[in-house]
């Protein structure tokens, strides 16, 4: 009897994984549902996805190619909280597909096996493999994926599989390129999410409030929330949630250690420290000075300070800029 698993070489792969008879995973075990629920709201369409016009246009153009039969892989990069996961699921919604979700550090051959099993058992449909936090992927599995992403060919026996779409998201594309550049090159559509404007953040908050809380909020309060969000939709929504309870913007900012324009007490400490030493200081030293993890400094604290022009990177570390010096005079 004809066996599609034998035909595609999947059985040989399963044996190489030392798992000759994997159990078929239940759909709910690997699908992250994005449908709006009472505790969360995510945009479901490009229209609801506020901001990022260039990214949306690039994705929509690529989707037209996919609908014509050309398969593409997407790499979405941007700061934490910028909407990478939401955009990935909107791609899935546009193709009427629920992505198979995994995280880079947890992506193994066994996880790939589960995805391939689902893929082979449901032929004739588009399937999406979504790998979040792609920068943390293991080098060996990234290398193993090269022929799969490029030619849909299994590296163990050269068997050809039915095409699928891979979406990766990362907050650290530079690290990904440095570690596994050939893997990155297999993603034909690479999208870099840009900084949000205060107007974008304000409109995101209005939409979120309408969908979740339906609380009356003044225009000026929306603007203040947006201005103190560090241009980060996730942080803005966190402030909005608290504001719907406290209704006091000054108290809210104080509770979150926000001094002004999204700058926290830790931000001010970094700017003051750089002004005092007046020479380049390394990232690890700055993290130790704040008594925070280096990753927290790297991904949460520093990007906003650089983006706003208070500090910059130079050979040997970070230094304060003129805008940072002027800020200190106003405090």
Image (cartoon, rainbow, N blue to C red):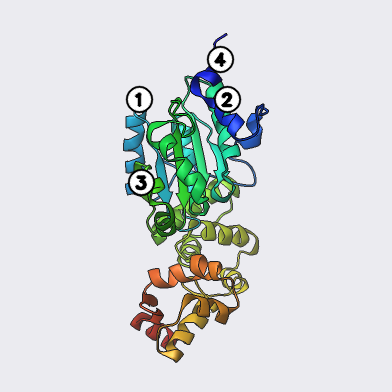
Residue pointed to by mark 4: 3
Q: Earlier in the sequence, mark 3 or mark 2?
A: 2
In the picture of the structure, the residue carrying the numbered disc 3 is: 185
Graded by Cα atoms within 10 Å as few (under 14), some (14 to 19) or many (20 or more), the crowding at tag 1 reads: few
Tag of residue 11: 2
* Residue 69 disc label: 1
Give whichever of 328, 224 is nearer the camera. 328
Looking at the rendering, in which quadrant would you find the N terminus? top right
Q: CA distance from mark 2 to mark 1?
A: 27 Å
* Of marks 1 and 3, the one in the foreground: 3
In front of the other: 20 or 138: 20
Q: Residue at x 49, y 81 (%)?
A: 270
Q: CA distance from mark 2 to mark 4?
A: 10 Å
Above or below for 201 versus 17: below
Say few, some or many: other residues with alpha carbon within 10 Å of mark 4 (under 14 / 14 to 19 / 20 or more).
few
Residue 323 visible in the current orientation: yes
């Amino acid at each position: 009897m004809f066996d599609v698993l034998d035909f595609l070489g999947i059985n040989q792969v399963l044996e190489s994984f030392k798992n000759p008879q994997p159990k078929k995973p239940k759909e709910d075990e690997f699908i992250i549902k994005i449908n709006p629920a009472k505790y969360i709201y995510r945009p479901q369409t490009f229209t609801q996805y506020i901001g990022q016009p260039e990214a949306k246009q690039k994705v929509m153009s690529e989707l037209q190619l996919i609908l014509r039969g050309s398969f593409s892989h997407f790499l979405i990069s941007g700061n934490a909280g910028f909407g990478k996961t939401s955009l990935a699921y909107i791609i899935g919604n546009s193709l009427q597909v629920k992505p198979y979700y995994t995280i880079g550090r947890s992506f193994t051959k066994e996880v790939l096996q589960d995805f391939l099993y689902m893929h082979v058992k449901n032929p004739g449909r588009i399937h999406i493999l979504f790998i979040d936090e792609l920068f943390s992927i293991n080098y060996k599995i990234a290398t193993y994926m090269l022929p799969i992403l490029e030619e849909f060919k299994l590296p163990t026996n050269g068997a050809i599989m039915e095409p699928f779409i891979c979406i990766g998201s990362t907050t650290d594309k530079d690290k990904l390129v440095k570690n596994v550049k050939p893997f990155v090159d297999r993603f034909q559509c690479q999208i870099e999410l840009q900084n949000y404007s205060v107007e974008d953040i304000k409109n995101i908050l209005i939409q979120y409030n309408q969908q979740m809380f339906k609380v009356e909020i003044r225009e000026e309060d929306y603007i203040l929330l947006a201005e103190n969000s560090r241009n980060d939709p996730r942080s803005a929504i966190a402030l909005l949630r608290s504001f719907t309870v406290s209704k006091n913007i000054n108290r809210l900012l104080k509770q979150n250690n926000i001094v002004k324009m999204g700058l926290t007490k830790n931000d001010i400490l970094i700017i003051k420290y750089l002004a005092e030493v007046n020479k380049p200081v390394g990232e690890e030293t700055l993290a130790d000075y704040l008594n925070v993890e280096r990753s927290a400094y790297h991904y949460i604290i520093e990007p906003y300070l650089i983006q706003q022009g208070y500090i910059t990177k130079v050979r040997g570390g970070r230094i304060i800029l003129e805008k940072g010096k002027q800020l200190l005079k106003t405090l």
